[in-house]
Image (cartoon, rainbow, N blue to C red):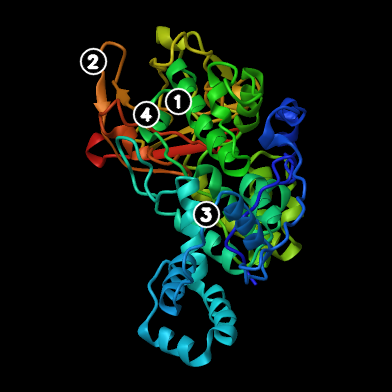
């Protein structure tokens, strides 16, 4: 039979199988003074009194304390009262009149157990008790804060909770999947969904997405976001207010600032983002394998010969050959280094690229001049490349390898004496854009909108634009 009560043994700090809890809080587990951290001891069951007709030892403890306090027992509840209580507890819904009639006809001794089993076996059980869990972790389907944008992909985690309760999932597994399911059980699709626990709380989208990477304000926003993850994790699974030690050693619990920032270090690698998932484990594993191969292929770590059999390779070669005339239309441009802003950049002959040193601040203009290889070009392409000299291999200078490009403008002049005239670009296209960014923002004449490529850093990305016909 299912139970509606979750009991945590807080002396076992590594119950979830995640070593970081035991490592970061080893000082707490060694405490012998705080009552809540002492090992649980099974007490002796008191002798039941003559007045207690229950066969449940829990009731014997209650009866023993009641007698010692000189309190009298409340009158026995009627069938109607018990029915309302169990329906409200297990389903959160009132019973129907037919349920009361059935219980009266069947009798309490025989019908009560059948009724409880029916309630616990219903999908409504998981719907009711998943709501309690969602309240504990402050789950929401919007981000909160000032923008409060909707979370279109929050529902799989909600359904995961409902299904976990209805399937009697062991609590240890339930905890593992939510704290580190993607790392501990990568082949289990449900475990990937369970990690939605870490991102279920409020998220300050304006601070996280609107502040330039690498700035002090961005670091503060990231610390605050991780603080919410730490608070939720520790209060949910350990019942401890660890976040009190963010500014000082805890006033009541044996938790130091060092303990708190040890946890900050653990969650430093966690970021919020939408991830593809499949409920079917076979499809999930195939998708993860293909995504891993794609990552390696884009980073030139995966030989193409291992991805293609002979038949597929022949087809690819035939397609490349048929498209060669189109591919040949793209020609690299060699910079003239006529502009002062470009003189600090270095030309890389191997891939015809420019390497710009890290700017003095987070905002700046990157400009260079070149001679068009065509008299009347029809399109222009910008490619950003990874480099070992950049954080996380770039292509940007941010600590995570990202960049934020606000505008891409092209100017032309027939000779060095003529004034510059802006070239009008249209139909922007690219291979990938970070959430809330877009390559179309590069030609919207708005410096507040940008194009970024997080989390696909460490690999090349490109965008290209058509040149309006009337510009040629």
Per the image, the residue denoted by label 2 is: 419
Nearer to us of marks 2 and 4 is 4
Mark seen at residue 210: 4
Quote the CA–CA distance across marks 1 and 2: 45 Å
Q: Residue at left 59%, top 84%?
A: 109
Mark seen at residue 71: 3
**N-term mark: 4 or 3:** 3
In this orientation, which residue lies closer to the viewer: 19 or 239?
239
Count of marks overlaid on the render: 4
Q: Secondary structure at mark 4?
A: helix
From the top left corner, tell me how far across and down residue 464 is, in percent.
41, 39
Mark seen at residue 63: none
Nearer to us of marks 1 and 2 is 1
Q: Are marks 1 and 4 in contact (CB under 8 Å)?
A: no
Q: Are marks 1 and 3 in contact (CB under 8 Å)?
A: no
**N-term mark: 2 or 3:** 3
Nearer to us of marks 4 and 3 is 3
Nearer to us of marks 1 and 3 is 3
Quote the CA–CA distance across marks 1 and 4: 11 Å
Q: Quadrant of the N terminus?
A: bottom right
In this orientation, which residue lies closer to the viewer: 70 or 395?
70
Q: Secondary structure at mark 2?
A: loop
Per the image, the residue denoted by label 1 is: 221
Nearer to us of marks 1 and 4 is 1
Q: Secondary structure at mark 3?
A: loop
**N-term mark: 1 or 4:** 4
In this orientation, which residue lies closer to the viewer: 465 or 84?
84
Q: Is residue 77 above or below residue 46?
A: below
Check disc 4: other Cα within 10 Å, few if <14, some if 14-19, many if 20+: some
Quote the CA–CA distance across marks 4 and 3: 61 Å
Quote the CA–CA distance across marks 2 and 4: 36 Å
């Amino acid at each position: 039979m299912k139970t509606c009560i979750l009991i945590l043994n807080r002396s076992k700090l590594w119950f979830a199988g995640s070593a970081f809890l035991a490592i970061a809080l080893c000082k707490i587990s060694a405490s012998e003074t705080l009552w809540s951290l002492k090992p649980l001891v099974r007490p002796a069951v008191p002798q039941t009194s003559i007045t207690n007709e229950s066969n449940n030892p829990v009731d014997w403890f209650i009866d023993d304390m009641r007698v010692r306090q000189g309190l009298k027992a409340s009158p026995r509840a009627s069938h109607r009262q018990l029915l309302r209580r169990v329906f409200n507890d297990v389903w959160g819904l009132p019973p129907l009149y037919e349920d009361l009639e059935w219980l009266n006809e069947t009798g309490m001794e025989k019908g009560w157990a059948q009724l409880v089993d029916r309630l616990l076996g219903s999908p409504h059980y998981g719907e009711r008790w998943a709501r309690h869990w969602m309240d504990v972790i402050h789950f929401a389907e919007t981000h909160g804060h000032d923008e409060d944008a909707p979370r279109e992909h929050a529902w799989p985690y909600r359904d995961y909770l409902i299904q976990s309760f209805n399937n009697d999932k062991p609590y240890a597994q339930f905890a593992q999947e939510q704290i580190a399911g993607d790392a501990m059980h990568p082949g289990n699709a449900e475990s990937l969904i369970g990690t939605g626990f870490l991102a279920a709380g409020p998220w300050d989208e304006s601070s996280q997405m609107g502040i330039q990477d690498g700035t002090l304000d961005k670091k503060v926003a990231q610390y605050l976001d991780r603080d919410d993850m730490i608070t939720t994790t520790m209060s949910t699974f350990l019942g401890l207010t660890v976040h009190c030690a963010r500014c000082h050693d805890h006033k009541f619990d044996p938790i130091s600032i060092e303990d708190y920032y040890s946890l900050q270090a653990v969650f430093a690698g966690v970021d919020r983002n939408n991830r593809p998932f499949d409920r079917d484990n076979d499809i999930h594993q195939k998708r993860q394998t293909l995504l891993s191969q794609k990552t390696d292929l884009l980073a030139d770590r995966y030989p193409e010969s291992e991805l293609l059999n002979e038949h597929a390779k022949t087809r690819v070669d035939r397609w490349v050959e048929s498209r060669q005339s189109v591919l040949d239309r793209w020609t690299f441009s060699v910079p003239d280094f006529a502009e002062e802003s470009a003189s600090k950049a270095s030309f890389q002959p191997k891939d015809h690229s420019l390497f710009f040193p890290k700017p003095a601040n987070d905002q700046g203009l990157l400009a260079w001049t070149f001679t068009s290889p065509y008299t009347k070009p029809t399109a222009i392409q910008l490619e950003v490349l990874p480099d070992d000299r950049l954080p996380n291999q770039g292509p940007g200078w941010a600590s995570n390898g990202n960049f934020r490009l606000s505008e891409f403008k092209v100017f032309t002049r027939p000779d060095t004496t003529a004034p510059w005239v802006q070239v009008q670009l249209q139909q922007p296209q690219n291979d990938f854009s970070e959430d809330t960014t877009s390559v179309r923002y590069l030609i919207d004449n708005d410096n507040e909108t940008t194009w970024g490529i997080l989390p696909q850093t460490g690999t090349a990305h490109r965008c290209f634009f058509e040149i309006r016909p009337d510009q040629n």
